[in-house]
Image (cartoon, helix red, strand yellow):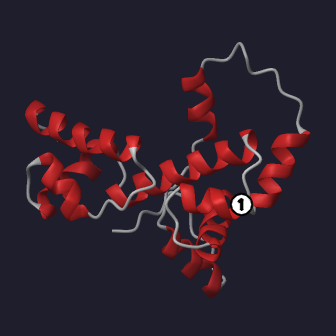
């Protein structure tokens, strides 16, 4: 289904705000106000336009930013958690591991141990390569693991 160009501009405005300040809280109501549409219409239209719900998009950005900080800085993992929008280390560590499959400390160790010559690779390609692929909600992934089931990674939570 094709979306109205004006609506897409409004959705992009909200997406850009999330990108610029992914550490902030972005409930659907706030995003809808940025876009100038109702909450229900925003949530439905955002998922249609970008393929993921707004919360999952924001989570992806936070994980992406945290991974870069783990790789490129000497900040403590707690400081990285707080800078990227989590309220505490426990939630950050659990969510990070659920999404990436590794703990923040393991990612830091692996990234620092790997030799890299990335100066010639465009930054947009690097970001895309390091972007977590959230095909299902983290809560659904946890439920599946608790139940001992492994459904297809293509499963989408409504």
Few, some or many C-alpha atoms within 10 Å of disc 1 (few <14, some 14-19, many ≥20)?
Answer: some
Image quadrant where one finds the N terminus: top left
Counting from the top left corner in percent of width and height, residue 157 is at 40, 68
Instruction: Please identify the quarter of the rendering in which residue 122 is found.
Output: top right
Image quadrant where one finds the C terminus: bottom left
Residue on which the image places disc 1: 77
Counting from the top left corner in percent of width and height, residue 153 is at 56, 59
Whether residue 132 is visible to the viewer of this picture, yes or no, is no
State how many labels appear.
1
Nearest the viewer among 25 and 139 is 25
Instruction: Please identify the quarter of the rendering in which residue 141 is found.
Output: bottom right
Counting from the top left corner in percent of width and height, residue 11 is at 21, 42
Instruction: Please identify the quarter of the rendering in which residue 58 is found.
Output: bottom left
Q: Residue at x 73, y 16 (%)?
A: 119
Whether residue 104 is visible to the viewer of this picture, yes or no, is yes
Q: Residue at x 54, y 25 (%)?
A: 124
Q: Is residue 150 above or below residue 121?
A: below
């Amino acid at each position: 289904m094709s979306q109205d160009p004006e609506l897409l501009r409004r959705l992009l405005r909200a997406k850009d705000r999330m990108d610029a300040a992914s550490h902030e809280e972005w409930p659907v109501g706030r995003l809808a106000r940025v876009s100038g549409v109702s909450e229900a219409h925003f949530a439905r239209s955002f998922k249609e336009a970008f393929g993921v719900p707004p919360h999952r998009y924001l989570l992806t950005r936070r994980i992406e930013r945290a991974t870069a900080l783990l790789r490129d800085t000497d900040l403590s993992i707690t400081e990285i958690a707080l800078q990227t929008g989590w309220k505490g280390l426990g939630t950050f560590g659990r969510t990070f591991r659920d999404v990436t499959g590794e703990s923040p400390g393991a990612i830091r160790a692996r990234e620092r141990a790997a030799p890299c010559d990335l100066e010639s690779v465009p930054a947009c390609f690097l970001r895309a390569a390091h972007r977590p692929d959230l095909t299902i909600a983290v809560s659904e992934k946890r439920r599946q693991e608790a139940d001992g089931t492994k459904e297809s990674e293509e499963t989408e939570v409504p």
